Image (cartoon, grey):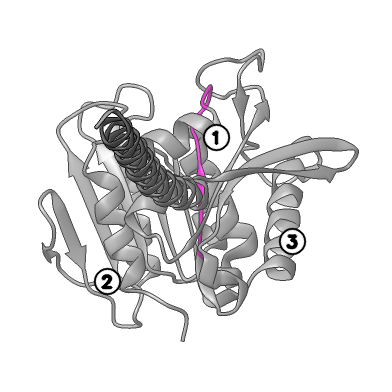
Amino acid sequence: MGETRGKDELGMKQAQNEQSEAGMQRDALGLGQRSVYLNSAALVLGFFLLALSSIHATDSPVRREWTVDGVVRQALVYAPSQARGEAAPVVFVFHGRGGTMHNAARNFGYHTLWPESIVVYPQGVPTPGVLIDLEGKMPGWQYGIGDHGDRDLKFFDAMLASLKEDYGVDEKRIYATGLSNGGAFTYLLWATRGDIFAAFAPCAAAAPQMARRFKPKPVLHLAGEKDSLVKFEWQQQTIDVLRRINQCGDGEPWEPGCTLYPSKIGAPVVAFIHPGGHEFPAKAPAIIVKFFKQHAKP
């Protein structure tokens, strides 16, 4: 009977050991499965974050440099991925006096409104002003033909040439816009490089003296009625001259605050008049993009 009890106790210990080992195996299996699940979740999250970062990197303009007459010039350039294989529109955006390419990209945001286009935000260099900053301490753009050795016109030529090398550029859809001093430079581009462009959108600028060099082109001019720097009457004179050059008729409503003057020769003028001063309304970029999309070179 003692032997039987000993055998029973031994059997019970063996059964307990087997159950304990089985439990440990199940626990280990459970931990392994949970580890697989956690690793899989981490992997999926990693791919998601990588994709998200790639999207943001693609959506952000990238700084590029050019050396023009021995001077390093720079711009922020946004290029959609498809521009590597197919022709894309190009929009040049020139900041005002004292501005920067970074502020222009952040505040104007043309690349977010027209993500299918290549958008260039060039950086100006210290330039003596005509109305303010006569000593030229702030970054800006040349005003007239031949000023400063035409450094900014050469800069534009270098930027456009490299874009054509690196991307597909739709040469029927190249545009320029700018604010204040950048708007004046936009008019200078019209006077000196007009054949390149499909349309222009100068803002808070005037160019009555340069207008004799203009060939008819679609144009949107933005002006503030209370502009005390670039006087509204100067800008109104510029709009009147543009209407004559482009052979425009009577005006008709277009977007809010905008009057469209149809052209007999396919070069309409839009006067975007706002009640403010020397400023850039928040709705302006979307309206300018709409205008550009409607016009391409024949």
- Circles 2 and 1, Cβ within 8 Å, touching? The answer is no
- Circles 3 and 2, Cβ within 8 Å, touching? The answer is no
Tag 3: residue type? Ser
**Above or below: residue 130 compared with residue 206:** above
Residue 236, visible in the rendered structure: no
Q: Nearer the viewer, mark 3 or mark 2?
A: 3
Q: Position of residue 264 (x, y in %)?
A: 29, 82
Point out the stretch of residues depicted in magenta.
90-99
The residue located at (13%, 48%) in the rendering is: 257
The residue wearing badge 1 is 101
The residue wearing badge 2 is 248
Q: Position of residue 219 (x, y in %)?
A: 37, 61
Decide which of tag 3 and tag 2 comes sooner along the chain: 3
Tag 2: residue type? Cys
Element type where label 3 sits in the image:
helix
As measured in the structure, the alpha-carbon distance from the residue carrying label 2 to the one carrying label 1 is 34 Å
Q: Quadrant of residue 62?
A: top right
Q: Residue furthest bottom?
A: 298
As measured in the structure, the alpha-carbon distance from the residue carrying label 3 to the one carrying label 2 is 36 Å
**Above or below: residue 264 compared with residue 150:** below
**In front here: 87 or 227?**
87
**Above or below: residue 118 compared with residue 27:** below
The residue located at (48%, 45%) in the rendering is: 53
The residue wearing badge 3 is 162
Q: Residue furthest front?
A: 1
Residue 230 is covered by the magenta coloring: no
**In front here: 65 or 34?**
34
Tag 1: residue type? Met
Residues packed near mark 3 inside 10 Å, few (<14), some (14 to 19) or many (20 plus): few
